Image (cartoon, rainbow, N blue to C red):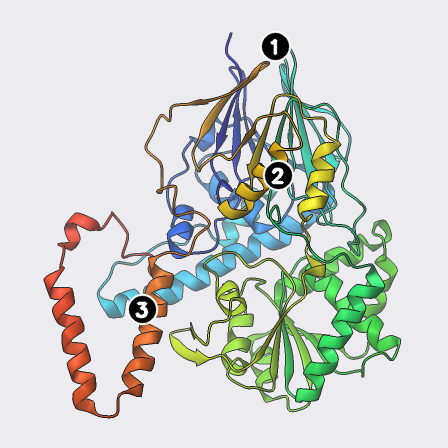
């Protein structure tokens, strides 16, 4: 009798692209279908074919609305999936906003890229999907309340537990029947942290056979803040930024993080702890997401505080590009919250380009920055970065406040895992390799259960006695060393910036010409025919 097979098609060795296929003889169910983010080599996966046939899926179960978990659903439907997508009501409300916004971003970025490609004599590309693709697949969503069992096939059913990470977020419990005995799996989704403004503590079942658990902060402990302590830290950052007289830029995820930070800022101003100043939400997506949070405010802890912040006289939202550009003309101290949270897209890149080189600017990171993203590069202390093709010197003060993280830290993850009573196997996903290794080593001393760190495209047979890695049916889409790491594009950017600085430091043109000649000679000596090294389409998606 065949046992279930679990395929790790995303978030394996990295924190994005969450996608897990559970395969039974009678059903094929996908848990999440997320967008890959980070280094360019990793984002290339979004353009490649799925490692399965979308039309053969029976259902998708979605943990939550964040794009790294939901962002390829429109592509899935575009390529033939026509079945149900099960999610909570709040998740569906957010997906209706976020997926169309993601499609719009795809179209906008590809339009700009194709303009550059034509100038460079390169071929044009198509967006991964369009806003219209996202709109057309929304009727496939089916709302599911927390705790209600739903049968997908005669031998498979699932229910959703509150994960405490985001409005509507869930952990997915799945029971596989019809094998030698019942097998229970739990997909953690993203496990929420303590003291979340709009969330309760994460829950889940006990005595599961297999747990597929996130490990984003598996190697680190955050300082534990009560809500008042978190606001004290935020107050100190705002006061110091205000003393500089420029702007406090907060790159923020548009959904929930923006609403949390906004609520805390207005609360501090209402309590006269910091001076009232303009607070601008420079993100159309955050504006629409705030309306969704407003509709669900009665269901949320501290929902009334959010409504007060939303209605504060010094808070405004920019909608048009003209309104956004006008922010560059503001002279008094002000605070701008803008997406995207990792500075990979959206209006935050324009704000950083305008302000990052000025010492009167403060940049505050309030969320996780994945390897290879602009946010991570700035956070790690880069002195110069490239934004929209221009070199920008970093003179701004860079601050991080991880008290807003939506992810449980190491001890919180250990506590949550301990309550699940895992019996057969624990798979660590949704974390960079360093975080997974530390977490795996730590858990080995605390539990007798075998812990696995799957690579992208690994497949495991799940029997009642344990998991077994099985051979792949196809070659891996990328080398295992690529996901979750900076790539050659990041190295090239660093080299170009360093080269520019070195050339500028040489006093005479003759010396600069000598350096450039030596570089050209080194390239000519090591030249490899491009036809032997470049895969199909490699040049097409360069940005």
Crowding at label 3, few (<14), some or many (≥20) Cα neighbours within 10 Å? some
Q: How many marks?
A: 3
Q: Position of residue 38 (x, y in %)?
A: 47, 55
Mark 3 and mark 2 residues within 8 Å of each other at the beta carbon: no
Residue 102, image x, y percentages: 53, 55
Residue 169, located in which quarter of the rendered image? top right
Residue occupying the point 83% across, 74% down = 268
Q: Which residue is mark 1?
A: 178
Q: Residues within 10 Å of mark 2 (few under 14, many from 20)?
A: some
Which residue position is annotated with label 2? 442
Identify the image quadrant of residue 411. top right
The C terminus lies in quadrant: bottom left
Q: Identify the mark nearer the N-term, 2 or 1.
A: 1
Label 2: which secondary element: helix
Horizontal side of 53 relative to 149 (left or right) equals: left
- Please state the horizontal and vertical placement of residue 162, each as a whole percent of the image: 75, 39
Q: CA distance from mark 2 to mark 1?
A: 35 Å
Q: Which mark is residue 116?
A: 3
Q: Earlier in the sequence, mark 1 or mark 3?
A: 3
Does any portion of residue 266 appear in the rendered image? yes
Disc nearest the viewer among 1 and 3: 1
User: Looking at this view, is 78 or 206 the one in front?
Assistant: 206
CA gap, disc 1 and disc 3: 55 Å
């Amino acid at each position: 009798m065949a046992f279930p097979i679990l395929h790790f098609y995303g978030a394996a060795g990295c924190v994005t692209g969450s996608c897990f296929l559970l395969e039974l003889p009678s059903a094929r169910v996908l848990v999440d279908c997320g967008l890959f983010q980070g280094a360019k080599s990793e984002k290339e996966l979004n353009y490649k074919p799925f490692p399965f046939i979308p039309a053969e899926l029976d259902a998708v179960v979605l943990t939550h609305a964040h794009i790294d978990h939901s962002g390829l659903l429109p592509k899935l439907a575009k390529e033939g999936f026509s079945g149900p997508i099960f999610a909570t009501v709040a998740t569906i409300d957010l997906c209706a906003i976020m997926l169309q916004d993601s499609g719009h971003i795809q179209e906008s970025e590809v339009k700009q890229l194709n303009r550059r490609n034509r100038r460079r004599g390169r071929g044009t590309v198509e967006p991964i999907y369009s806003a219209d693709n996202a709109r057309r697949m929304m009727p496939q969503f089916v709302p599911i309340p927390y705790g209600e069992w739903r049968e997908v096939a005669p031998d498979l059913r699932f229910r959703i537990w509150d994960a405490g990470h985001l409005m509507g977020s869930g952990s997915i419990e799945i029971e596989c029947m019809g094998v030698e005995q019942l097998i229970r799996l739990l997909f953690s989704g993203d496990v929420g942290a303590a003291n979340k403004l709009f969330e309760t503590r994460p829950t889940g079942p006990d005595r599961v056979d297999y747990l597929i658990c996130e490990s984003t902060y598996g190697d680190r402990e955050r300082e534990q803040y009560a809500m008042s302590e978190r606001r004290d830290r935020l107050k100190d950052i705002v006061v110091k930024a205000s003393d500089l007289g420029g702007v406090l830029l907060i790159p923020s995820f548009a959904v929930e993080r923006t609403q949390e930070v906004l609520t805390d800022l207005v609360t501090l101003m209402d309590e006269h702890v910091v001076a009232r100043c303009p607070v601008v939400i420079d993100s159309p997506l955050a504006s629409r997401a705030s309306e969704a949070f407003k509709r669900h405010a009665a269901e949320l802890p501290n929902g009334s505080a959010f409504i007060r912040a939303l209605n504060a006289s010094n808070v405004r939202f920019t909608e048009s590009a003209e309104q956004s550009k006008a922010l560059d003309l503001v002279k008094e101290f002000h605070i701008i919250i803008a997406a995207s949270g990792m500075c990979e897209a959206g209006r935050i890149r324009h704000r950083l380009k305008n302000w990052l080189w000025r010492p009167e600017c403060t940049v505050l990171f309030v969320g996780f920055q994945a390897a290879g993203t602009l946010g991570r590069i700035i956070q790690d202390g880069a002195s110069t970065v490239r934004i929209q093709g221009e070199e920008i010197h970093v003179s701004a003060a860079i601050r991080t406040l991880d008290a807003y993280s939506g992810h449980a830290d190491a001890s919180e993850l250990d506590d949550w895992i301990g309550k699940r009573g895992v019996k057969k196997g624990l798979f660590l996903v949704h974390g960079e390799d360093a975080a997974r290794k530390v977490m795996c080593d730590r858990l080995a001393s605390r539990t007798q259960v075998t812990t696995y760190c799957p690579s992208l495209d690994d497949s495991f047979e799940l029997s009642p006695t344990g998991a077994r890695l099985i051979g792949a049916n196809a070659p891996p889409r990328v080398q295992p060393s690529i996901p979750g790491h900076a790539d050659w594009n990041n190295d090239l950017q660093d080299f170009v910036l360093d080269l520019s600085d070195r050339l500028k430091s040489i006093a005479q043109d003759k010396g600069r010409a000598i350096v450039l000649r030596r570089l050209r000679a080194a390239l000519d000596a090591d030249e490899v025919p491009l036809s032997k090294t470049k895969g199909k389409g490699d040049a097409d998606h360069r940005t």
